[in-house]
Image (cartoon, rainbow, N blue to C red):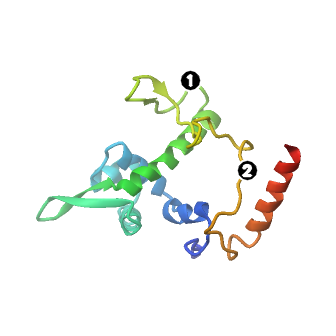
Amino acid sequence: MARTSFSQMTCSVARTAEVVGDWWTPLILRDLAIGISRFDALQDNLGVSRKVLTDRLAALAEHGVVAREPYQEKPTRYDYFLTEKGVDLAMVLLAMAAWGDRWVFGEGSEPVLLRHDACGEVARPVMTCSCCGEPLRAGEFTPFAGPGLADGPGTRRTREALERLGALRAGAA
């Protein structure tokens, strides 16, 4: 069965899913983010087929998320690494890990902990407001239509829903 493409949807979630939504892709990104950079090491760590890994790395390179650099000739072999775009995308993985730590594993059973280099403390990823620095939590902000929103596949009712939500939140204030 062919996968539906989200590439034409004017939705940031859909377009991000277009890049990372294939099976194995988030795990490939995770491994690259922690320094597993060679094809054979990625394949061994994940247990994914060579064909799937090749396809996923090619798609990530096409999206500008991953780049490769030869480390050996005859045969040519490559190190893969996250581009600036890929490093930014790794923030999505941190959010997924935080959710998994809380809802799948539970406190005290986290598979991987994060030490914040600046302060040396074990930390958990938290989204914060870029203006005031306060944590952002669902239900504590009001989304509204941005300049790039267009009605179409995947967003036919988005503008209407955002307006309704805004009116509800304004009425509750």
Looking at the image, which residue sits at the far left? 74
Q: Earlier in the sequence, mark 1 or mark 2?
A: 1
Q: Is residue 47 visible?
A: no
Query: On the image, numbered disc 1 is attached to which residue?
Result: 108
Query: At x 60% / y 40%, what residue is drawn?
Result: 99
Q: Is residue 74 left or right of residue 143?
A: left
Looking at the image, which is closer to me, 138 or 173?
173
Looking at the image, which is closer to me, 26 or 137?
137
**Relative image position of residue 123 (x, y in whole percent):** 49, 28
Under mark 1, the amino acid is Gly
**Relative image position of residue 71 (x, y in whole percent):** 16, 56
Looking at the image, which is closer to me, 42 or 17?
17
The answer to whether 116 is drawn above or below residue 146 in the figure is above
**Relative image position of residue 154 (x, y in whole percent):** 68, 71
How many C-alpha atoms fall within 10 Å of the one at disc 1: few (<14), some, or many (≥20)? few
Q: Is residue 26 visible?
A: yes
Q: Is residue 71 left or right of residue 104?
A: left
Query: Label 1 vs label 2: CA separation?
Result: 33 Å
**Relative image position of residue 59 (x, y in whole percent):** 41, 67
Q: Give the numbered dot on residue 142.
A: 2
Query: At x 46% / y 33%, what residue is drawn?
Result: 112
* Tag count: 2
The answer to whether 171 is drawn above or below residue 114 in the figure is below
Under mark 2, the amino acid is Thr
Q: Secondary structure at mark 1?
A: loop
Q: Give the numbered dot on residue 87.
A: none
Query: At x 42% / y 52%, what residue is drawn?
Result: 29
Location of the N terminus by quadrant is bottom right
Nearer to us of marks 1 and 2 is: 2
Q: Secondary structure at mark 2?
A: loop
